[in-house]
Image (spheres, helix red, strand yellow):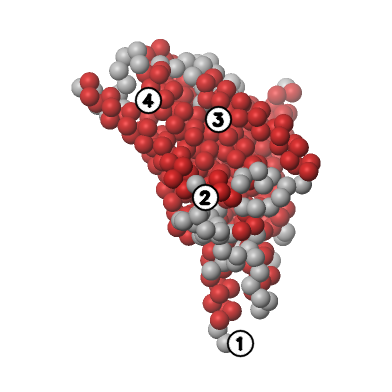
Amino acid sequence: MIRRTIGWLPSALAFGVLSWALLDLPANPPGLADAALRSLERSGVANPVTAVLLNYRGYDTLLEVAVLLLAIVAVWSLQPISTSSVAEPAAPILSSLLRSLLPLLLLTSGYLLWIGAFAPGGAFQGGALLGGAIVLMLLGGLFRRRLWQRLALLQASLWVGLAVFIGVGMGVMFGGGRFLEYPNGHAGNLILLIETAALLSISVTLGALFFGGRPSLDGEPPPEANP
Amino acid sequence: MTDAPNATFLLAGAALFALGLRGIFAGVTPLRQIIAVNVMGNGVFLVFITLAARVAGGRPDPVPQAMVLTGIVVAVCATGLALTLAVRHRQEQNERSGTSPP
Amino acid sequence: MIVQVFDTVLAVLLVWLAWRAVSDADPLRSVVKFIVLGMMLALSWLRLGAPDVALAEAAVGSGLTGALLLVALRRLQAARSSAGGSPRKEQP
């Protein structure tokens, strides 16, 4: 009984200190909203969160895409794929649901990508939705084993987001600007280009994270049990 | 936005952080500890978004919201990697205990 | 007035779900409570004026993390059950 009470002490302490610090903060600070909204026309998009993600703090987003790639490389280095993840047949109700749901998910993720410049949405939301669609496809057994083993295509879709981001960032340096400094008037198109590549990478990375193992290198069937 | 809802959410965020902290220490298996770390992260996100909502002027502050968006994606990557590590660790334990003589 | 009640109920629900997710005895229930916590959190983001974050949280923070946790739970339970000396069976 005493031990249980003592066990709660660190949490209670953390809660107390945090609440005191948080409630002590100023009630209506100026924040960065005005600065972000003032430069919104020059940023190329009309959604302030997208502007922050891909223009004002674009470097952070580049590092985030790199973290995605790093995570899937690490997961693949740990674990080869197992058989049953790949070839389970789907229950009929699941496959009939997926036949109507998957085109809708594809369309909605493309819509979110496009609308992210004007309204809530963007590459991450669309990528998350498309990643969910890929997970559903895996669960429903709609992926042929051969598709997963088309290694070059799979790998390309994993790094294309980061590559396009870095490529655009360095490409704008040719006009004499700095890294990721979009030229005037082209910011919107460049952001859309980066977001499209990032959507592909994010969705395939999330699907591959769910799958959990690396595909075999030369097209042979995956091992039966863990090595 | 008035102050009152934000105080509620700030306290809830601090509580989530504290509960996650408790879960890391009290977690028996790695899975529980991973859930606890995610709960802590969600508490931090709650505090961030609440602070973004209470800026002066009408619109919420987009910078903390973008940070939380990045944070959510990074958290899911870290969770995926941590879960793979946990499963692999368990498999290694099984192999080691399977080959050692009883 | 109704808004304050909604906020209070939502905050209490978040804290309760987090507590149960961390301290439930059955790991499956913990994961389910965690998924529901993510969904309630997405609702909170909407309440706090962050729709972009709500979209990402509902899809990735709750949905995909929950799916990852469930798959890992199944693999861990299968690994635990095969540790008793039974012949190596297929990992799910």
Q: Say if labels 1 and 4 share a chain.
A: no
Mark number, residue A126: 3
Depth check: give the residue in front, B47 or A193. A193
| Mark 1, residue position | B102
Q: Secondary structure at mark 3?
A: helix
Q: Is residue B49 above or below residue A10?
A: above
Q: Is residue B26 above or below residue A160?
A: below
Tell me which numbered mark, 2 or 4, is placed earlier along the sequence.
4
Question: Horizontal and vertical percent for residue C22?
Answer: 65, 53
Q: Chain of mark 2?
A: A
Question: Horizontal and vertical percent for residue B11?
Answer: 60, 39
Q: Amino acid at mark 2?
A: Gln
Mark number, residue A56: 4
Depth check: give the residue in front, B48 or B85. B85
Q: Amino acid at mark 3?
A: Gly
Q: Residue furthest right?
A: A93
Q: Are marks 1 and 3 in contact (CB under 8 Å)?
A: no
Query: How far, Cα to Cα, is label 2 from label 3?
Result: 25 Å
Q: Secondary structure at mark 4?
A: helix
